[in-house]
Image: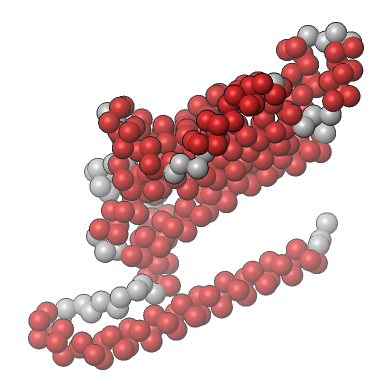
Amino acid sequence: MFKPQGFQAALISLLLFLLFLGMWSLATFTREQATLSSVDAEYTVLMGKGAEKSSGFPTPSKVGEAFITYLSDPFYDNGPNDKGIGIQLAHSLGRVALGFLLAVIVALPLGFAIGMSPLLLQAFNPFIQILKPISPLAWMPIALYSLKDSDVSGIFVIFICSLWPMLINTAFGVASVRKDWINVARTLEVSPLRKAFQVILPAAAPTILTGMRISMGIAWLVIVAAEMLVGSIGIGYFVWNEWNNLALHNVIFAVVMIGFVGMILDQIFGVLQKFVTYRE
């Protein structure tokens, strides 16, 4: 069914994007002309007539060339420091998936226990409040020293940063389940396991998925920074390596790809949330 509002929103988004490209092109063109005018004589003396002049910040066309180059063959492998963007993203997503899965395994049952027991909530709350504000990257030196492996350390950091939103939201969702539903289950002498899966879990599912969605967003943010520090492969390492090569157009390309993948991950959890809410 055609929705005029959706078409109008898409048109506005396109116009804003074109306006951004226009301003970017104008800014880089103006800066390039000013730079070339001021240093042309000195550059010619030092580098020779045939040398290519650097224009500083890359133009949209230069970044577009990076998109064409990397997306035309995303899985090429020319050695440790020259791999396609598909391989880089796959390694980053693998680390995120494993760390996130470990966090799910710990956070969901522990969150259930804390949400169903006021005693456990009071006992665990001091630890949660102290550990939650710590930057995940602050754990990296400890992880590297203890685990002796950069890949495992990156997964551990993802686990740590994914744990707290899921744990807190699970505990909150379980604790917020309507008491009359639990009382009915108790009256019918429903077993604890059945009560957890058939009464509490469906009611708390939207809140739990919200915590998982937040955790995934944080995990994708953190993996980029973690790979800049220790990764030998991954999208974060790609950004850092291209920066060291002064290939800023490739850095911008990678930043866009990071945002695009993050949007897809967020949309997946958004669909799951809508599905669970609809079933509820």
Foreground residue among 106 and 121: 121
Foreground residue among 243 and 114: 114
**Where does the image place residue 24, in percent across and percent down from the top left?**
46, 77
Up-down relation of residue 35 to residue 134 (above or below): below
Give the quarter of the figure containing the C terminus: top right
Which residue is located at x 12 percent, y 79 percent?
Answer: 47
Residue 219 visible in rendering:
no
In this rendering, would 171 be left or right of 133?
right
In this rendering, would 116 be left or right of 33?
right
**Where does the image place residue 46, in percent across and percent down from the top left?**
10, 81
Up-down relation of residue 186 to residue 57 (above or below): above
**Where does the image place residue 177, in percent across and percent down from the top left?**
79, 29
Q: Quadrant of residue 32?
A: bottom left
Which residue is located at x 53 percent, y 54 percent?
Answer: 260
**Where does the image place residue 72, in percent across and percent down from the top left?**
41, 55
Residue 17 visible in rendering:
yes
Which residue is located at x 67 percent, y 30 percent?
Answer: 171
Give the quarter of the figure containing the N terminus: bottom right
In this rendering, would 242 be left or right of 96?
left
In this rendering, would 198 be left or right of 68?
right
Which residue is located at x 47 percent, y 33 percent?
Answer: 159
